[in-house]
Image: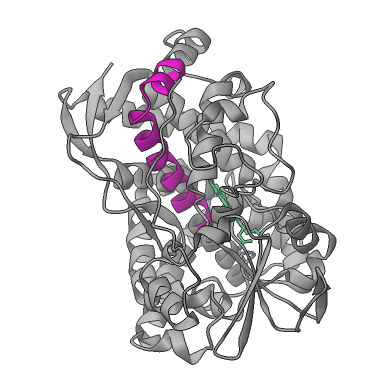
Amino acid sequence: MTHFVPPYPKRHKQDISPLKSLLLARRDLLSIWTEDSFELELMSQKILKQHVFIANSPDLVKEIFVTRHQNYERKSPQMRRALEPLLGDGLFISDGETWARRRKMQTHLFNVAHIKRYSTTMIDTTAEMVESWAKTTSGESLLVLPEMAKLTAEIISRALFGEKMGAEYASEVVDAFSDYQASVSQMAIPNFLGLPDWFPMIGSKRGRINSSAKRIHDIVDSIIEKAAHDPKQDTIATELLAANKAGENINKEQIRNEMIVLFMAGHETTANTLAWFWYLVSQSPEVEKKLHEELDNVLNGALPTYEDVPKLVYTRAILEETMRLYPPVPLLSRQAKNEDILRNKTIPAGSIMIVSPWLIQRHKRYWDKPDHFIPERFMPGAKKPIKFTYLPFSLGPRVCIGKSFGLTESILCTAILAQKYRLTLPQGEKVTHECRLTLRPKGKLPMTLIHR
Ligand code: HEM
């Protein structure tokens, strides 16, 4: 089998100056790395008085996310600053006791019984997309990234707000989010590098950030108000409202914050994964053939059920390899609470600590053919990846709470769509990446829709 090497940004031969990496990072966070970065284990830089460390080995990842989690649980101040107007004290950016209490309160919303319930929504929503694609003529062009974003936004929206309101409000919430993202984009790119607070504010307008956050708050508040009058529905909104009614420590504003976190964290990451999946499969005829064989054997033309998910091992392996090569969240950044020592290096309190799935998932020491697309490495029976070198969902107590949601959703969506359709890349179409808060294909990823 010949393996495809999908494109990645040029790697510098030698170290680049902090100022140059800053300027490059403003455009593209993945363009700052040298060849060495994929071999080194602990890197450090001092950028404008700020210590920035990059931990890039399994033992260090374990220390940061598991063993010394409490010292590194706090998101970087720049990340908090960018998201606070929108998320308030929501799970994604809170820490300490607030984080621990909210995390505990929401854990059951992502247990097996709940994922099984959401899977019906995932299947129904994707089946509706199959129907809408059926109206096209084979060979038509399709903008894959927005199409996948529409699908995942609708799924999370229905899980949060219920079938009717979810479908009604999904696109309105997405629009409001795009507006917010545009208003913070100036801040978002250098955030991870731990630049001083004034730096990202150049050119960005606090007023616009606050007003686009308010637009989202108003929409979500009105959905929650309606949900409060219809408590019969099984949705995340009604469950959190029931917790509030039962006297648990969460008020309506905090419920809104958590709903916004789940919407934000839950749709773009999955949409990006799905978009990369279609691109990678389209470039690897042998992988595509094996995918179709699995779908035909396991599903035999029927829609999958939740019980089929564990049987779709190759579909899952393709998705896992997709997230290794293109992790939707390519950089995880934290702020050290107290001074620490790692590998005999002093980490001053307040330092920015970065773990990058982009780097460690392509690390030359830990991965064989790190830049090749080889889904077989994730198949049962293959040698398992070295622990703590694969972390598209992060690891430890702050691991993505929606990991099973996102994986189940990705498997069901791709299985249902690939059963009926192929997506091919038009001749001459070049695919590159865009890296902002998340990593996605640049542009809208136009592909050709072929009916199978
Ligand atoms: C392929 C899909 C997904 C990927 C790759 C992904 C990845 C991640 C990563 C890397 C983090 C940690 C971020 C950090 O530490 O800075 C995270 C956190 C989080 N994710 Fe996901 N995610 C996905 C889907 C979802 C879904 C579907 C949901 C909700 C339904 C979700 C909700 C969250 C929440 C609430 C957090 C914050 C958890 C905490 O801090 O305790 N994610 N996700």
Question: Where residue 431 appears, x then y in whole percent?
Answer: 29, 46
The residues colored magenta run 265-291
How was this image coloured?
A: one colour
Q: Main secondary structure of the magenta part?
A: helix
Q: Quadrant of residue 75?
A: bottom right
Q: Nearer the viewer, residue 394 or 419?
A: 394
Does 274 sit left or right of 389 as displayed? left
User: Quarter for ligand 1?
Assistant: bottom right
Does 39 sit left or right of 152 as displayed? right
Q: Quadrant of residue 110?
A: top right
Question: Where residue 398 appears, x then y in whole percent?
Answer: 71, 58
Numbered-mark total: 0
Identified at 54% across, 22% down, the residue is 314
Identified at 35% across, 37% down, the residue is 279
Identified at 42% across, 68% down, the residue is 216
Does 311 sit left or right of 213 as displayed? right
Location of residue 294 with respect to 164 vertically, above or below:
above
In the displayed image of the protein, which residue is found farthest to the front?
Answer: 13
Question: Where residue 7 appears, x then y in whole percent?
Answer: 37, 46
Location of residue 189 with respect to 31 vertically, above or below:
below
Magenta stretch holds residue 240: no
Location of residue 49 with respect to 158 vertically, above or below:
below
Magenta stretch holds residue 273: yes
Q: Where, quadrant-wise, is the C terminus in this rendering? A: top left
Question: Where residue 50 appears, x then y in whole percent?
Answer: 61, 86
Asked whether residue 185 appears in the rendered view, the answer is: yes
Q: Quadrant of residue 390?
A: top right
Asked whether residue 262 appears in the rendered view, the answer is: no
